[in-house]
């Protein structure tokens, strides 16, 4: 690992100032379970690091509000996963956290850092002799003619087919979460849907934050639909593994059992957290049945472009959506 | 904009960190690149904490930081600032009596090569304290971050069950 300058500012305001002072090679350090891991592998090579992990200003969260959940970017995933309000009123959010990583990692990992975790593509992590456009722009993509079993089938490009690996962002996306940011240009708020980029020709650019900009908090509108939600995650082993496919879904049912509101977001299948709006529309006004749930799954995966070894993800994705809808429907009806 | 930071001195390449390790006050001059795992093993010579993968994937390096279990390999050592670090060496009573979880691992023969065991035990102690050892399924789920290459899982499960019950009857 190459040497870097380390700063542990005493406040959020100082952190923003330190990020600006550090210049382009400066990175934010939260739990470090992505950043420090990738620094040890030589993928991330910051010249300076601004540590925010100790800032109490960032680590609080409040789930008691009537209109929105307010979650500090520094809140630990383990604490959020245990929150009784989240578990009752929005089980998909709590489940996405409880099913992510391991308890040790969730004790370190943060709500903000989780959103910006980087792909688990083995060529990206392993590096030379394999080419990787995300790691070295223009060098090529080893996965496209290599082992792409874990890779994405949605949102891919000629340059990169790496899957976005996280769970939390997928669940938040289904609930129209927004992010409060603070940077050198002052504060602004963006929808979470505007945070992640598809790879296109520039897979090295994964998000839309400006240089030196921090995520301060996540805000999630409270909706009655939350109670009828579920996060379903399919992995190679039962626990402590990234998603091959995941679905965060929510439904609200009317008096006759027809779907009044519906949210579907996918993980493990796409290059970024993926909202399936068209699939949601197929269910509106319909009864939630085995048939309609599968149709929603098929619609969500309609644009899938599998590679060599990941064709199974299309059928898996369809069924993951359908199964998640069944659980959500049961919760919505009870 | 003035917040009183001296920019020249802002980014340090050595960091002074005070913490306690197994109850003992320790003052460290750290290179911010160092992991808590390497500091504990190489500098403090507490080699009970093991390095399996060094990438967060096996749990062999599990220690407690301010009472919570974390992976020492993915914890920058600077994150121990002002914290209490507990490693496997600090678990037994000062008079040498094993911690109930250690005793349960002995009773249930919950290891073969033993490489994963310190991490398993540190994880299990926290798992019970968190209230995540209510039944076998919950124990399996909340210990899933600790892999065992020897496949000693049935014994590990039995040991955690025994220790959780003893704690509950406490
Ligand atoms: C073995 C292993 C298994 C895992 N399994 C899963 C899994 O199953 N599901 C899952 O979802 N995740 C999984 N993870 C990923 C884990 O959840 C993330 O590494 C973690 O959430 C990142 O949070 P952090 O606080 O450690 O971030 P850091 O590593 O500190 O930071 C991550 C990135 O976010 C940036 N950043 C952090 N905070 C902010 C902020 N407030 N504002 C702006 N930028 C910021 C950093 O600069 C960095 O680029 C796993 C990780 C490991 C190592
Ligand atoms: S899929 Fe993306 S991250 Fe993986 S090798 Fe190709 S360019 Fe690199
Ligand atoms: S050595 Fe830390 S998790 Fe494997
Ligand atoms: S006892 Fe050998 S790895 Fe667990």
Image (cartoon, rainbow, N blue to C red):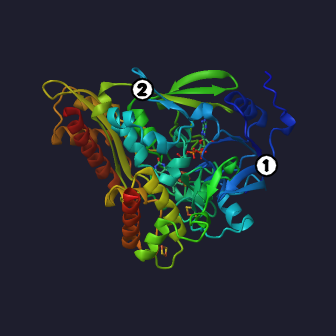
Q: Secondary structure at mark 1?
A: strand
Categorize mark 2 by other alpha carbons within 10 Å: few (<14), some (14-19), many (20+). few
Judge whether A125 appears above or below A289 on screen.
Answer: below
The picture places residue B114, in percent across and down from the top left corner, at 52, 76
Instruction: State the quadrant of the C terminus of chain A.
Output: top left
10 Å crowding of disc 1: few (<14), some (14-19), many (20+) = some
Q: Which residue is mark 1?
A: B15
Residue B24 position in % (x across, y down): 70, 58
Q: Is residue A210 left or right of residue B100?
A: right
Residue B63 or A334: which is nearer the viewer? Answer: B63
Report the residue marked by disc 2: A64
What separation in Å lies between label 1 and label 2 (alpha carbons)? 39 Å
Marks 1/2 in contact by CB < 8 Å: the verdict is no
Residue ID at (54%, 70%): B97
Q: Is residue A48 above or below residue A253?
A: below
Toward the viewer: A81 or A150?
A81
Q: Quadrant of the N terminus of chain A?
A: bottom right
The residue drawn where x is 72% and y is 46% is A46
Quarter of the figure with residue A228: top left
Q: Position of residue B126 (x, y in %)?
A: 49, 56
Res. A273 in view: no
The extreme right residue here reads B8
Above or below, B119 against A260 in this view is below
């Amino acid at each position: 690992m190459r040497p870097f300058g380390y700063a542990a500012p005493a406040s959020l305001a100082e952190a923003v100032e330190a990020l600006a002072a550090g210049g382009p090679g400066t990175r934010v350090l939260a739990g470090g379970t992505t950043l420090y891991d990738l620094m040890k592998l030589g993928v991330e090579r910051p010249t300076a690091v601004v540590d925010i992990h100790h800032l109490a200003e960032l680590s609080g969260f409040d789930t008691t509000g009537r209109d929105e959940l307010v979650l500090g970017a520094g809140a630990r995933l383990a604490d959020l996963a245990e929150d009784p309000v989240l578990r009752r009123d929005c089980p998909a959010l709590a489940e996405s956290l409880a099913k992510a990583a391991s308890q040790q990692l969730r004790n370190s990992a943060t709500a903000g850092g989780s959103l910006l975790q980087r792909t688990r593509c083995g060529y990206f992590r392993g590096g030379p002799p394999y080419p990787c456009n995300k790691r070295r722009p223009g060098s090529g993509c080893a996965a496209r003619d290599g082992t792409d079993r874990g890779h994405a089938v949605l949102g891919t490009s000629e340059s990169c087919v790496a899957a976005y690996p996280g769970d939390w962002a997928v669940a938040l996306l289904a609930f129209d979460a927004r992010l409060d940011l603070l940077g050198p240009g002052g504060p602004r708020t963006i929808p979470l849907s505007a945070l992640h980029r598809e790879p296109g020709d520039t897979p090295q650019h994964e998000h839309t934050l400006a240089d030196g900009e921090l995520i301060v908090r996540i805000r999630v509108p409270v909706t009655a639909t939350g109670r009828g939600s579920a996060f379903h995650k399919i992995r190679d082993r039962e626990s402590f593994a990234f998603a091959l496919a995941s679905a965060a879904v929510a439904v609200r049912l009317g008096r006759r059992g027809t779907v009044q509101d519906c949210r579907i977001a996918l993980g493990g299948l796409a290059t970024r957290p993926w909202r399936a709006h068209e699939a949601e529309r197929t269910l509106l006004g319909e009864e939630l049945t085995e048939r309609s749930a599968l149709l929603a799954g098929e619609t969500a995966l309609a644009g899938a472009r599998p590679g060599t070894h990941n064709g199974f993800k299309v059928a898996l994705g369809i069924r993951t959506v359908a199964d998640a809808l069944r659980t959500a429907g049961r919760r919505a009806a009870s | 904009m003035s917040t009183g930071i001296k920019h020249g001195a802002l980014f340090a390449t050595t960091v002074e960190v005070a913490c306690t390790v197994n109850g003992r006050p320790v003052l460290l001059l750290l290179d911010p690149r160092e992991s808590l795992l390497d500091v504990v093993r190489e500098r403090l010579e507490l080699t009970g904490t093991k390095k399996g993968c060094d990438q967060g994937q096996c749990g062999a390096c599990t220690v407690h930081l301010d009472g919570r279990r974390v992976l020492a390999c993915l914890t920058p050592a600077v994150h121990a600032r002002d914290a209490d670090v507990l490693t496997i060496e600090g678990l037994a009573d000062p008079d040498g009596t094993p911690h109930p979880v250690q005793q349960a691992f002995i009773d249930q023969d919950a290891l073969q090569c033993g490489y994963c065991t310190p991490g398993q035990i540190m994880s299990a102690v926290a798992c019970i304290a968190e209230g995540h050892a209510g039944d076998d399924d919950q124990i399996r789920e909340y210990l899933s971050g600790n892999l065992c290459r020897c496949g000693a899982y049935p014994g590990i499960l039995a040991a955690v069950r025994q220790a959780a019950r003893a704690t509950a009857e406490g």
